[in-house]
Image (cartoon, rainbow, N blue to C red):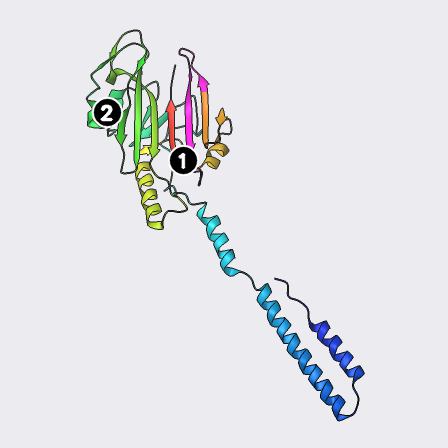
Amino acid sequence: MKKLALIAIIASMSMSLAACGSSDDSSDTSSETTTEAAAETTTEIETETVAETEPDTEAETTVEETEAATTVTAEAVDFTPVEGLSDNYADLENRSFAYDGTIYTLGECTLKDLIDGGIPFNESDLNNKGNNLNANYETSSYTATINDFVSMQFRFINNTDSSKTEEECLLSYVRWYTIYVPQPDYDESLNEEITANINDAASHVCFSFPLTLTKEQLLENNPNTTEEDEYNNVDYLIDSEVYMGSSGYQFEFNDATNQMEQVSIDWLP
């Protein structure tokens, strides 16, 4: 903060008074009175100046707290991808994830493979595993609850010319999502609980990227997006060679923090 320089003013006033003064008592009294008045005025100005230029600590603290709050994100705990997953966060040639250390690749593994691998599908969904699925059809979603805040969904496709049971069909879609991510306006205990649930999910579920992924981290790793929209979605898609439509990776990030809320990977031959 700049302070007003009053030394020159005081010096100037003192010199002026000295030049105008005389040797008689009345003049001395007048000079003393004028000098005292000047001193009082100077003190008054200095006090007011300090008050006016004193830094607004409360306002600066509020700004700092606000800036810090908008960057609240969950922190990944020692993220190391399972060996065999791609270094590319949106690798269209290797659309895979891992559960408890086992890698599952879309278009290669079946529902039975995922069941045998211990993925915790809801029992009501597993009742459909023996149902027949017609050629060129996809199953309804199978849901797996990972913990209180995090879940996954899966679909499977019969891309053959004859019917198959659903458990024989190939994995065609996987979606990971959390109902909460840390927020600037949440209290600390809730943000800690959210972070704990995301990191708990990461102890079982692994993609080539951390579950605490931010939009900035994704774009730094793979800037070759096919679409970014105003809703904070980022897509990496290619057209199918057999069916109408496209498939690939779709990421959705939180508007306030740019942390990933969900990601889906789908596959069409």
Q: Earlier in the sequence, mark 2 or mark 1?
A: 2
Residue at left 24%, top 18%?
167
SS under mark 2: helix
Kindly report which numbered mark, 2 or 1, lies closer to the viewer in this rendering.
1
Q: Is residue 115 magenta?
A: no
Is there any visible trace of residue 204 in the rendered image? no
Give the extent of the magenta segment: 238-259
Question: What residue occupies the far top of the structure in this picture?
Answer: 161
233, 267: nearer the viewer:
233
Is there any visible trace of residue 2 in the rendered image? yes
- Say few, some or many: other residues with alpha carbon within 10 Å of mark 2 (under 14 / 14 to 19 / 20 or more): some
Pick the quarter of the image with the N terminus: bottom right
Q: Is residue 71 left or right of residue 181?
A: right
Residue 102: horizontal and vertical position, in percent? 30, 28
Residue at left 64%, top 78%?
40
Q: Establish if 96 lies above or below 44.
A: above
Residue 96: horizontal and vertical position, in percent? 36, 25
Which residue lies under the disc numbered 1?
A: 260
Which residue lies under the disc numbered 2?
A: 115
* Quadrant in the rendering for residue 6: bottom right
Q: Establish if 254 lies above or below 50.
A: above
Residue 131: horizontal and vertical position, in percent? 21, 15
